[in-house]
Amino acid sequence: MRALICAAFVAALTSCAITTPHFAQTTAATSTDISNPHHTQSANDGWGAHEGPVTGGAKAGDAHVYRVRTRSELVRALSAGAVAGSKGPSSAPKVIFIDGTIDLSVDAQNRPLSERDYQDPAFDWSAYAKQFDVETWGKKPVEGPLEAARKRSADTQASVVVIPVGSNTSLIGVGGSALIKNGSLMVKNVENVLIRNISFEDAYDYFPQWDPKDNANGEWNSEYDNVTVYGSRRVWIDHCTFSDGARPDKINRTSLGRPMQFHDGLVDIVRGADLITVSYNHFKNHDKGSLIGNSDSRSDDAGKLRVTLHHNWFDNVKERSPRVRYGRVHAYNNLYTATAGADYGYGYSIGVGLKSQLIVENNVFDIDASQARVFKLWRGDRISATGNLLNGVPVDAVVMLQTQTSSPVASDVDWVPPYQPIVHAADRITAAIKAQAGAGRLR
């Protein structure tokens, strides 16, 4: 079956009412009409617009405006206009409207695929758990025929569910029901990509990797984000909704003494990605929200990872909203909520990582938790944070971070935003963000 899946895919590839208060979401007239294929990001909209607004496929001619309803139609539209003989998605300007639900874990006839369809004949979870039991295997890296079979299984799934997106692309949801599920969009080493008005859910990794040296007792690590921005520039992700869908982590099984993890990030921005704006999105019911910079060892990320997050709602997201290394990140007017009894226990919201320089202003943290440590130190040493409210009371990020280290934490950064955002007082934003953030909320 695995060979058949691979062969099949090689062939397949040839306005809601808003209650007051209301925030102006755009300044360009063309940006508000979601049915207009030529709409673009507004000028001055965060780091993403720093070298000019993200236009995506706005310059596409009528022949390169597509309305897609299946995985195969999406892949064909992303590849249209490619130079003969080239591999991967096209960089020709294109606008792709997502109409309804697109399941990325399907075969060429749009039939759903399961773990069994991707699984290598030599792989077995029971045998895997027995071989790598910590009592006998210990802490050394996993290796051998069973691990090789797991990797082959993972590669087979990735060949189906990871969809590369090319430069000069607009991906836009139709109405309020556009959904991409069971896979991942990979925005890798490209430029000028616009993603709007789409719900993403359940980027599910059937074959997570066991790392016996991760934390004290080992951890399972999954592979797929709903959207990964990898080494790309000038990307705008706006008015989308991200979640685990029908398979939250609480239903997952346990193996090797640890809960198995089948979801990774919602939107991760890594490997030198730069000039990104993430706005008016709803991130909900998830463990690891958004990683900006994926390794302390990647010193070449310095000077990149310039990201703006504004007017997003992080709703019962356990952690990483975001966690930042190296980046110059501006987070303003975002809403963070965590309710007792949710699928995911609350950990923290903003992670201050190595060499990060965050400006965090006028955000609301409404956290129902016994210890609401909304800022967490991850080898960082500076942050500029003003006007933020924790459960209605001003919160001092530096004081909170300083309790986590004996080294000094500075209350400033060495940059200022090169744009002029309209930043509202934190006590004004909660109702408006709940009304406006997420797919189907554009007006």
Image (cartoon, rainbow, N blue to C red):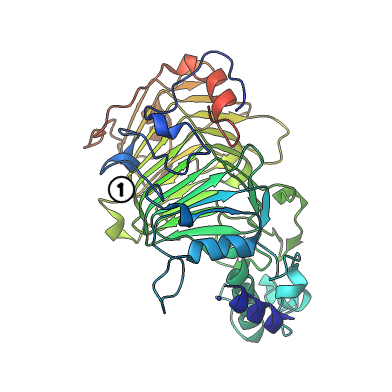
Which one is in front, 155 or 44?
A: 44
* Any part of residue 357 in sight: no
- Quarter placement of the N terminus: bottom right
Circle 1 crowding by C-alpha within 10 Å: few under 14, some 14–19, many from 20: many
Name the residue beneath numbered marker 1.
355
* Residue at point 26%, 33% (across, down): 417
* Residue at point 62%, 65% (across, down): 72
Residue 103 position, x and y percent, is 68, 57
Name above or below for residue 424 compared with residue 43. above
Name above or below for residue 127 compared with residue 39. below
* Any part of residue 340 in sight: yes
Whether residue 31 sits left or right of residue 369 in the image: it is left
Residue 302 position, x and y percent, is 27, 53
Whether residue 13 sits left or right of residue 307 in the image: it is right
Whether residue 261 sits left or right of residue 47 in the image: it is right
* Residue at point 57%, 18% (across, down): 431
Which one is in front, 160 or 155?
A: 160
Hey, which residue is sitting farthest front in the picture?
62
